[in-house]
Amino acid sequence: MAGKRLERYLVYLALVLMAVVVLFPLALMFRISLIEPKHFFDVPVSWFAPVTVDHYRHVLIDSPFPKYLANSLIVSLATTAIVMFAGTLAAFALARHRAKNKDGLLFFVLSTRMGPPVVFAVPMYVMMINMNMIDSRLGLILLNTFANLAFAIWLMYGFFKDTPPEVEEAAMLDGLGEFGVFTRISLPMVTSGLVATATLVFIMTWNEFFYALIMTRDVAKTFPAQVPSFFGAFAVDWGGMFAASWLGILIPLIFGMAVRKYLARGLTMGFTQ
């Protein structure tokens, strides 16, 4: 019993240390966003320096940052909805129907995620110009859908493969159609997987920087593409940058906390192919 108790305490200690390592940079960034510029380069950091909200006031009122934050939210929600709708249907079809060379088809789907974004940048940019979608939310939604659809298909494919097909077959024998089986039987069985996949797709779209930087100018710019604007030629607005970064963290943080009870189960299932 003493050995098990010691082992448990060591695990707790390791988890606490990991949490400190992960959270310390966030705490440091938050503290710097609340201090005056003259304390930016204090060593060590002035944790007890006077608090000011001028940086947040500047970001929220005196700059177009709220517009770019709204663009990020619109693009992320729309992309997540489209990716989950198309990806779930495709994953269910691949998991339940016998198709010739299914492994090759899955590999082809995955191949769209194998190259870095810069590999697809030139053809995507030319396509966006020809479609008159440069600096448009719709164009950015399409680009993020292309970037994340393969990920959603593969993840949801694993979730559907983990569910017993006998339940679906019994429902079909009772007279339920194939689409009814999908919506009323299969989807409820992979609820945790749906939430986990949607959360990851949302976060990846929210944090997407490369396409947002090169495909937008002002109208559809998202907040990650706006953050470099705090770097000037001769100075860096550290307070404004950290304030903007913290505002950008809040939405996915709230979203993740709202669905946290589904994430633990969802992220530990779906990997048996």
Image: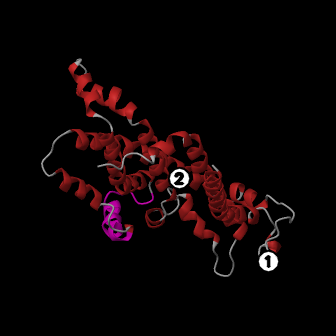
Is residue 127 inside the magenta stretch?
A: yes
Q: Amino acid at mark 2?
A: Ser
Is 184 located above or below residue 39 in the figure? Answer: above
Residue drawn at x 48%, y 60% as measured from the top left: 208
The residue at which mark 2 appears reads as 72
Magenta range: 118-135
Apparent side of residue 187 relative to residue 169 in the rendered image (left or right): right
Q: Residue 200's x, y, as percent?
A: 46, 51
The residue that mark 1 highlights is 43
Viewer can see residue 78: no
Q: Position of residue 176 (x, y in %)?
A: 25, 21
Q: Is residue 84 visible?
A: yes
Q: Disc 2 on helix, strand or loop?
A: helix
Q: Are marks 1 and 2 in contact (CB under 8 Å)?
A: no
Q: Main secondary structure of the magenta part?
A: helix
Q: Nearer the viewer, residue 214 or 7?
A: 7
- Farthest bottom residue? 234
Packing grade of label 2 (10 A; few <14, some 14-19, many >=20) is many
